[in-house]
Amino acid sequence: MKSPIPDYLRQVLEKARPDDSGQLANYIDVLAKADPSKMAIALSTVDGNLYSAGDDEVEFSIQSISKAFVYAIAIEDAGLPRVLEKIGVEPSGDAFNKLSLQPGTNRPMNPMINAGAIAAHTLVAGESASAEERVDHILKVLSKLAGRQLKVDEEVYEAELKDANRNMAIGYMLKAAGIISCDPQDAVRGYIRQGSITTNVRDLAMMAATLANAGVNPITGEEIMPHQSARQVLSVMTTCGMYDAAGDWVSRVGMPAKSGVAGGIIGALPGQVGIAVFSPKLDERGNSFRGVKMFEQLSSEMGLHMMDISQVGRATVRTWTLTIAGGAKQPDEREQEVPVFGLRGAVRFAGSERLTRAIVRELTPPNPDDPGSGRHADASAVIFSLKDTYSLNYVALRIISEDMRRLLAADKNVVVIDPVKVLKIDGNPAFKEKSPCVVNDEAEARRYIGGQGCRAVSHSDEFY
Amino acid sequence: MKSPIPDYLRQVLEKARPDDSGQLANYIDVLAKADPSKMAIALSTVDGNLYSAGDDEVEFSIQSISKAFVYAIAIEDAGLPRVLEKIGVEPSGDAFNKLSLQPGTNRPMNPMINAGAIAAHTLVAGESASAEERVDHILKVLSKLAGRQLKVDEEVYEAELKDANRNMAIGYMLKAAGIISCDPQDAVRGYIRQGSITTNVRDLAMMAATLANAGVNPITGEEIMPHQSARQVLSVMTTCGMYDAAGDWVSRVGMPAKSGVAGGIIGALPGQVGIAVFSPKLDERGNSFRGVKMFEQLSSEMGLHMMDISQVGRATVRTWTLTIAGGAKQPDEREQEVPVFGLRGAVRFAGSERLTRAIVRELTPPNPDDPGSGRHADASAVIFSLKDTYSLNYVALRIISEDMRRLLAADKNVVVIDPVKVLKIDGNPAFKEKSPCVVNDEAEARRYIGGQGCRAVSHSDEFY
Amino acid sequence: MKSPIPDYLRQVLEKARPDDSGQLANYIDVLAKADPSKMAIALSTVDGNLYSAGDDEVEFSIQSISKAFVYAIAIEDAGLPRVLEKIGVEPSGDAFNKLSLQPGTNRPMNPMINAGAIAAHTLVAGESASAEERVDHILKVLSKLAGRQLKVDEEVYEAELKDANRNMAIGYMLKAAGIISCDPQDAVRGYIRQGSITTNVRDLAMMAATLANAGVNPITGEEIMPHQSARQVLSVMTTCGMYDAAGDWVSRVGMPAKSGVAGGIIGALPGQVGIAVFSPKLDERGNSFRGVKMFEQLSSEMGLHMMDISQVGRATVRTWTLTIAGGAKQPDEREQEVPVFGLRGAVRFAGSERLTRAIVRELTPPNPDDPGSGRHADASAVIFSLKDTYSLNYVALRIISEDMRRLLAADKNVVVIDPVKVLKIDGNPAFKEKSPCVVNDEAEARRYIGGQGCRAVSHSDEFY
Amino acid sequence: MKSPIPDYLRQVLEKARPDDSGQLANYIDVLAKADPSKMAIALSTVDGNLYSAGDDEVEFSIQSISKAFVYAIAIEDAGLPRVLEKIGVEPSGDAFNKLSLQPGTNRPMNPMINAGAIAAHTLVAGESASAEERVDHILKVLSKLAGRQLKVDEEVYEAELKDANRNMAIGYMLKAAGIISCDPQDAVRGYIRQGSITTNVRDLAMMAATLANAGVNPITGEEIMPHQSARQVLSVMTTCGMYDAAGDWVSRVGMPAKSGVAGGIIGALPGQVGIAVFSPKLDERGNSFRGVKMFEQLSSEMGLHMMDISQVGRATVRTWTLTIAGGAKQPDEREQEVPVFGLRGAVRFAGSERLTRAIVRELTPPNPDDPGSGRHADASAVIFSLKDTYSLNYVALRIISEDMRRLLAADKNVVVIDPVKVLKIDGNPAFKEKSPCVVNDEAEARRYIGGQGCRAVSHSDEFY
């Protein structure tokens, strides 16, 4: 069977093709002579599957899309506090090439306008780095993000450099304001060079997917930036990525994004996908005209709007009862009905809350207003089944551990079926006094409650 | 067992208590004499469980928090296109009481500043509605959101009205700009009255949870606003809810939010929770000082930042094999090994993509570079298990249906275990030619493949 | 002989007539239906001669031209310090109906924009005055300025009041900012009423001439405002009178001016003329299109640009010698050659300096480099002829008095021919020790130096 | 006798000395180490008398004061239309070092802010001029203005160049906006060099006096710039010279002015004086603190406010009667009473109007309401005495010529006593048909009317 996903992407692309509105960027010849008929789209899942359609091998300069990644590199190299001291995070409401220094602090409003991006560029690779070192470092990281060696388009670089007066102005203004410490001309040249790196939509989709995957390259598994950096970059892309239409973009598309003047746009939805589109003609805001159309389709059809309730998987809780016969040691013992609480999916606060509620309902005395409650008020053992639990975040771990601690404190037997060890036992303060018994499957749980000890576990489920 | 969640909220609250910085709003006496020691926090899950801590019965005026809900009502009553014609969605970078009309359109920048909120107020209940009718309608909807009858604090209303010069100015300016059509004094009086409605944190948490639950009240199950309205409100809260610090709030807290001058703040995370906090002293931006602290804690500890990868539950795919004996009709038939593809959780694009990938891997000829591939290249039947599938969004439904269509076209038997009917068959264009057989459980699937027909299904799983 | 001046004005008017560009103000019907073919011009000298041409009897509403005069009334009624506390004097660069409150002080930028003009209106007639009292007082003063009883056009007033939303907005904003203390609606109604007073160009030319004449009505001689108020009004008209084109107007026309939306413009050149023009069609800045053309002609042809050097009359100094025979008492005495210093015109610093220079040159020992110097180094008497001196300002009086004091201290006879008493002797600190002898004419000066005493003087010269 | 004027300046200076508020400019070391106790004042009349007091030989860098003169040079070298195309004339309300490009045109707001001044600098000496040529030309013109060879302070230049980032930014922004065509670094270096020229207050007072004298150096008599340029410069200084306080300065001081960061300020009052002050400590606007105080004193005490009515000398008209006996040819003729109209001072429109009024009054039939009128209704001859007329501007010449034409047309004898030939006869269209007889003095007028012909005239009056 052939996957229908490339077919779907092709449909998105063809639906956007008929309207060839917009204008090629014409401030430099090399952009003005781009082929306006080229169109491409690519999508990478956070586990590294890359689909594409259209002219997906056509290369174009990354331009302002580099700003998002260089901001991440700056955070890595200089630390977030220093980066925040030099560059704000507020939308400017201005066009991309405005100075927009914040009154008082003199910081550029955000790293997605040129002023902030030039400042971010100079924070790469340490204060004493030369321009070459900064660009080399950026090229190296972007190549790791893309998963192949990228390079600078020297023709674009030379052309941009000739038209760099406004950026030079910004560079000197930043120097005057104490925001950058290196030579302004060096800073601007390096910044222009970073934007002259060429990519295709497949490269960009991989790069975006790395942001969506908390900084880990979905294919190589390498952590290219810490997850806090990825979160910061995505936050700033949300409010500042599409220039002077932050609110409009968030309302209509609802995804952190960044566009470049050569016609590329990337979008990244945390935990899901990285997307890249390409079409050289620009709308009046300087974003790819057809690119925006493709993103609007993807958002509405694929349900990728981050304010859409469907974005969030609901971790589910299921309760059932296991009847366990008396163990071998105590052959005269009565069978017992042991409640099992099964927890599925990625569990955050909401899931842990649902679990807690289920436990309270089953184990406290029956409530006349709630007919099904109190069914296991007298249970002497409780089983938690975490074998379908994908992950527990900090607060979920804390709340579930506290649930177990309270049960243990009430002298219940607590057994956890946790073959992949999502529940941290070691060092967990809830388990300082007593620990639950962790088992590999229901059979072991049965054996344990029936009287045997715990066994080592191993993991065999196959996940795609 | 007692739930640990209220204890957790209490910890959040106590951690924020020691720093009593900030100032009471002092422009009217009734706010200036608020008790600055009061603090409260409440949290409602999207399935309607409400937790709270602190002074959760203390009532205070809703103030600007009403703007978010009245914007939703305006969308419902006047339609989104008309609302967008009158009120923008861009962050203004200005303080809340600035005019901030957009050059050109004269629209208020967004519905979270006073100008936009007054405009939104006038779009409630139809153009011919009187001021009383607008306020009555708002009070009715807010009461439904809160789940109890709310009322206006007349003392607050009278005091605000005496200090309403700036809002009156805004009202007349809106009238002059053609944004509102009713009498400006009426508009402002109604707007002030809407902000004088009193609530406690439990009310507000329920209201926020309704936004997070796509407009459906988590307890009553009533759809109070369409999910598109809820999405629009959350989008605008993301970029404009916290006044002149949109970027900062998105970076640090990462949750759509709205604050009021009486000391309340609400936050809503789609598909998860609605949160409300209260503490009357305000920071220099006019947001509750301790309220902001509590939100920062909740965001970092509870992992509620919307750019956090952990926010998104990963739908999982599992593959196993069912050995099915020849049916009664064909006693001589060999046993067959049927591949089963199990899909769990809320499935969006990513989940459907993972499923597709698994199918392709199992059913196409073995790939020498991928040792486990091609194991069922010759299978004559395929089972999809959707019994643990919580939901399928539009694109996921489309892709999975297309997978099935291709298998059916290749003359495979396709059986879907789908007790709760998440897969739409009726009217699905993929199944115009041939349909899969939908069954209730594995036993039925076995029977069908073994030679029997399909049976009707019923649903019995208990979900919390 | 018929005066050619009305003919000249007629030429100015006809030269501007052919270009009927511009638009009638159309925000209210009564202005939109004005006859666009009407044109008029009037000019009053500071000594009260009024010339006019065109439709000089056509009445139109004074509109914003009233702002200049009401500012003067506010200064008179509330005092300049209080007026400056409430209203700035800086050009705003904004259109006339912008709020333009100064950051920090919240003051309207200047009294020529609506916000400042409304504030000025409320400072008329004392804080406790009613709206009627304010308007009555303004009407009374404007009538005195025009030299005839003016009245309000009720049709204009009613129409403007219906379209007053923006001004109402401004009124409330001023109230909120603490700039005005009365009811905002009253303030705006009074302000609109003041602008609905009707005038013709002859009225306005007289009113402008009063400003140019330091606040004294050129015909009645009544001091309607102190000269400091007139100076302040003219200063503010210079930088703020023509809205957002202060610099352009000062460069091209060079005269304090104020325009009104009904098509009138006044200009006032201190010490010279008041001018008014009228033509209802407005340019894109809201100034009368033909009115501006007429002012440009008047400025370039009549040399009325205030930065034109020809604006300033040069007071002249002339020196000659009087041969005086010995007096009767000393018949044997030799004739003496007495230097006479004649000073003509309005003498300010420059004239007094020139005089001083002449005295030093004549009375100090001859300088070999300056052949004509030192001719009266031995003179025992000096005559000052002030009979052609029009006026002495403060510094000129001070310097000339000091010249005389030094001559008296050197035991010279100092005689002043000063029939109109421009030189103040009484209370002049320079003359505490010795006083010059003041005489009526040269004959008396001769007699005095020849040995007789001083005689009383009388004034007979006839000035136009 | 010693002139009291230096004593007066000394008093002004000493009155300002006690308050040593303000701060030295500290952005470069060479300014930060200036001696804050130095103070000086100088004043030059438009006829070239220079007075000074205090540290009048102390040299300091001219800084922004150069902007006024370089603007004049740019107008001379590139023409006013091109200069206006590149640089606006509107006050910016911003600090001196803001970009303040006008929306739409991208022009710097005015030539007194750095952006406009850098643009003006590049318009000097032709588009193909090198940076050296521009600076050489500026230095040459400034030296002519000062009346001595000025030079650049290399230490200041080097220090400013090191701190030039903001100006470099402005330079590149101007280049990007298409305002300047040369290399931005060259432009900024030249601009900094022009500001590093050193001067003392005596130099600056002479330079200011040249502006006040319509572009003619008062001492050398050389026309250094056309009077239109001087007028343009003074106009722009009026609205933009004192940065963000144009209105305040015009109200309080009322004189075109320009300040520099080294502590100098110049002021120029057209037709009167040029003034310069020096004191290095600056107020918060960057103007010399004591310098502003000295200007305020000079304005109020010396009556130098340009909106002061006393600024304008009133040309005066005097009428008397000459009794002329019958001439030799007609011995039997009766004596005739001939009216004489004497006109004194600098005559502009107002003077010519007064004269016209006098003629009409005397020569038309008696008006019963005006007892003195119609006294010469039957006169066959009229004498105009222009011997005390300092000048006639364009409109005055035109009106007086027209008066004469009308009298000649009515067959009156018209005789003009005009020893210095202020009345243009040649080519005057009023005299195409008939000309008045121009004579040198009253005796000649008598002879002419008595029957003799006209004689050649010569000029002998001595004016200071």
Image (cartoon, coloured by chain):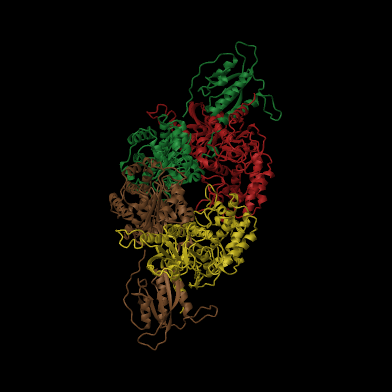
Chain colours: A yellow, B brown, C green, D red
Residue D256 can be seen in this image: yes
Residue D152 can be seen in this image: no
**Front one among D288 and C373:** D288
Furthest residue toward top? C329
Q: Residue at horizontal 41%, vertical 57%?
A: A410
Query: Which quadrant would the C terminus of chain D be assigned to in this image?
Result: top right
Q: Quadrant of residue C80?
A: top left
**Front one among A295 and D183:** A295
**Front one among A289 and D377:** A289
In the shown orientation, is residue A170 left or right of residue C48? right
Q: Position of residue C43 (x, y in %)?
A: 43, 38
Furthest residue toward bottom? B332
Query: Which quadrant would the N terminus of chain D be assigned to in this image?
Result: top right
Q: Position of residue D326 (x, y in %)?
A: 51, 27
Q: Quadrant of residue A351?
A: bottom left
Furthest residue toward right? C368
**Front one among A202 and B151:** B151
| Residue A199 drawn above or below residue C47 | below
| Residue B91 drawn above or below residue A390 | above
Q: Position of residue A285 (x, y in %)?
A: 48, 60
Q: Position of residue A342 (x, y in %)?
A: 41, 66
Q: How many discs mark residues in the rendered view?
A: 0
In the shown orientation, is residue C382 left or right of residue D412? right
